[in-house]
Image: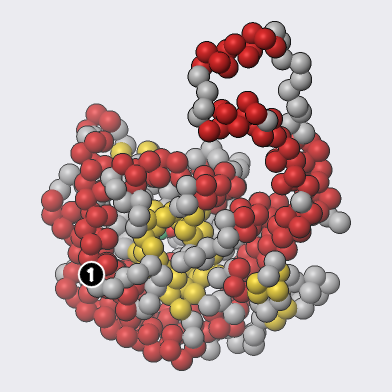
Amino acid sequence: MFFDFIDKVLYEGSSSKNPFAFKYYDAEKVVAGRKMREHLPFAMAWWHNLCAEGSDMFGRGTADKSFGAKYGTMEHARAKADAGFEFMQKLGIEYFCFHDVDLVPEAEDINETNRRLDEITDYILEKMRATGIKCLWGTANMFSNPRFMNGAGSSNSTEVFCFAAAQVKKALDMTVKLGGSGYVFWGGREGYETLLNTDIKFEQENIARLMHLAVDYGRKIGFKGDFFIEPKPKEPMKHQYDFDAATAIGFLRQYGLDKDFKLNIEANHATLAGHTFQHELRISAINNMLGSIDANQGDLLLGWDTDEFPCNVYESTMCMYEVLKAGGLKNGGFNFDAKNRRPSNTYEDMVKGFILGMDTFALGLIKAAELIEDGRIDEFVKLRYSSFDTEIGKKIRNGNVTLEELAEKALEMKKVDNVPSGNQEGLQSIINSVLFK
Ligand code: XUL
Ligand code: CO
């Protein structure tokens, strides 16, 4: 037992002063026709919660993630799984996400790494059966090992391309073994530092080839879920090919991958791309590509990926507004790709981080449902485009008109008398009145 200071984290309501209770997340409570736990399939990210110790560019880790075992051993791999399952059970988190090398120490020889992965996934599978906890998605870490310094699918080396293929194959095997409903490609090194040494066209074609091979293999071994691209504009590379949702969707369509892939949208990646989280979700949703969410938050004053636990209710409300409008996430969930701040280095802080994140999204869900129920935003948007319900509007929409006819109409009108207001401040005031009533 690693988290002895808590039994099960329960819902106590917003007036509770208990730091180890949910203030808004009430798993069984019905909001907008479904239970909160069904709207919000929360997942624990193995890498942040069980591996990351808070090291940064200027100092080593501050948190102890040894869980009583020696680092670099299979005993440690099992201790992490023990801690992770105890943690998820106590918080009522029903899913987890993993990279291959989050689970075991990587060996010199990939054959030995794969053997270790078989051993740990047997162990994890037993725990999943005992607890009912499930795998949301798996992925291969193709950015940490030095062999990926020039990319994985985009590498200039066929040797590296083979290793990328081997890791994707194994990670797909594990995802299927653990019953995951998603497989993620986050292309951390799929990009470039300088165009002086880079053939973008060649690199993008090769990434697409690797993805096609992954789809073919995945479907062959019975993977029925979704493949996801997780867009991010930069970091670690200066420029990453999956810059944002629109770029990733264009790529998927160009290379015929759009039937098998959707997007995994991360809040902090959206802001790094110069977009809001809501923008990235909307672009995905209108293209039928909203797959899953990496639920975290960045710091707008910092230009890098801080992966904070989300606390901004305005943002989570607009996120849940998009998710509700899109009809929910089918094969996806809300993966806390988030880590405690470096000085928040205790086991208590780990629990508090998840309570904060889960409550922030629960409150966002409640408020988004209220906004939709309120109806004024929807009504205004409908009204805003209502001139397209007129005879000429319908003709434009249906493509039944020529440029000459439209120009003729303008000449008849002579001038535009009235373009209706955008009412932004009025709408923002509605949001505040729903958020803070
Ligand atoms: C990195 C990031 C990754 C992906 C999975 O910014 O978000 O952890 O979610 O590789
Ligand atoms: Co992520």
Q: Nearer the viewer, residue 2 or 357?
A: 357
Q: Residue at x 76, y 28 (%)?
A: 421
Image quadrant in which you'd find residue 166? bottom left
In the current view of this chain or complex, which residue is farthest to the right?
A: 437
Instruction: Indicate whether 257 appears above or below 347.
Output: above
Q: Residue at x 24, y 55 (%)?
A: 212
In the current view of this chain or complex, which residue is farthest to the left?
A: 158
Disc 1: CA contacts within 10 A as few (<14), some (14-19) or many (>=20): few
Task: Please indicate, yes or no, whether residue 232 appears anywhere in the rendered image.
Answer: no
What count of labels does the image hold?
1
Q: Is residue 354 rendered to the left or right of residue 74?
A: right
Percent position of residue 262, x then y:
41, 55
User: What colour scheme governs how the chains and residues are painted in the rendered image of this protein?
Assistant: secondary structure
Say what secondary structure mark 1 lies in: helix
Q: Residue at x 64, y 12 (%)?
A: 410
Q: Nearer the viewer, residue 383 or 207?
A: 383
Instruction: Indicate whether 271 appears above or below 344.
Output: above
Image quadrant in which you'd find residue 170? bottom left
Q: Nearer the viewer, residue 164 or 208?
A: 208
Mark 1: amino acid: Lys
Instruction: Indicate whether 99 appears above or below 10.
Output: above
Percent position of residue 311, x then y:
67, 58
Q: Quadrant of ligand 1?
A: bottom left
Q: Is residue 270 rendered to the left or right of residue 145?
A: right
Q: Residue at x 27, y 54 (%)?
A: 211
Percent position of residue 55, x then y:
46, 59
Q: Nearer the viewer, residue 160 or 67?
A: 160
Residue matched to label 1: 220
